[in-house]
Image (cartoon, rainbow, N blue to C red):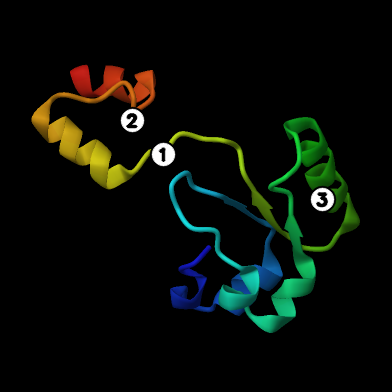
Amino acid sequence: MAEIVSWRDNETLLNSYNFIFVVRAGTRKVDPKEVLPRQALARVRNLTDMGRVKMKRQISEGENSGENRIYIVDLGAPDVSATRIRAESERESPSATMSPNLFASIFKK
C-alpha cells in the first residue's frame, strides 16, 4: 500500500475497483492517511483485528453494497519476499522456514 503514490492513475484505479491490501510480516504498518488520496479514505475498511470469518463477511457485505472499497487485512501470512526466494533458488537451498513447502518443491524441479 505504501507504493500507491507511484502508481499511474492511482486515484482512478482506487475509485474504480475494490482493493485488498495484505499486511506483510516484518513491515511497518502504513497509515492510509499518509499514502492514499484524500477522497479514497472514506472507503477504507481496516480489518486487521478481525478473525477470518468476520473478515470474509465484511468483504462480502462490501461487495454487495455496490461501492468500491479498500480493505486492509492481516492474514498472518509468512514473510515471502520474491528477492529472498530468488536468492535462495540461486543457491539451490530454499529455506523451509522462509519459503512455504510449495516454493521448495518448485525450486527442486
Residue visible at 83% across and 63% down in the picture = 67
Secondary structure category for the residue under label 1:
loop
Q: Taking 54 as reference, is 37 left or right?
A: left
- Nearer to me, 15 or 23: 23
Q: Disc 3 versus disc 1: distance between alpha carbons?
A: 28 Å
Q: Earlier in the sequence, mark 2 or mark 1?
A: 1
Q: Residues within 10 Å of mark 1 (few under 14, many from 20)?
A: some
- Decide: marks 2, 1 in contact (CB < 8 A)? yes
Q: Which residue is mark 2?
A: 98
Residue underneath mark 3: 63
Q: Secondary structure at mark 2?
A: loop
The reply to whether the C-beta atoms of the residues labelled 2 and 3 are less than 8 Å apart is: no
Q: Residue furthest bottom?
A: 38
Mark 2 surroundings: few (<14), some (14-19) or many (≥20) residues within 10 A: some
Q: Earlier in the sequence, mark 3 or mark 1?
A: 3
Q: Is residue 42 above or below residue 62?
A: below
Residue 17, image x, y percentages: 68, 62
Of the residues shown, which amino acid type is indicated by label 2?
Met
Q: Looking at the image, which residue is at 55% across and 49% down?
A: 23
Tell me the kind of residue under disc 3: Glu
Residue under label 1, please give it.
Answer: 79
- Sequence-wise first label, 2 or 3: 3
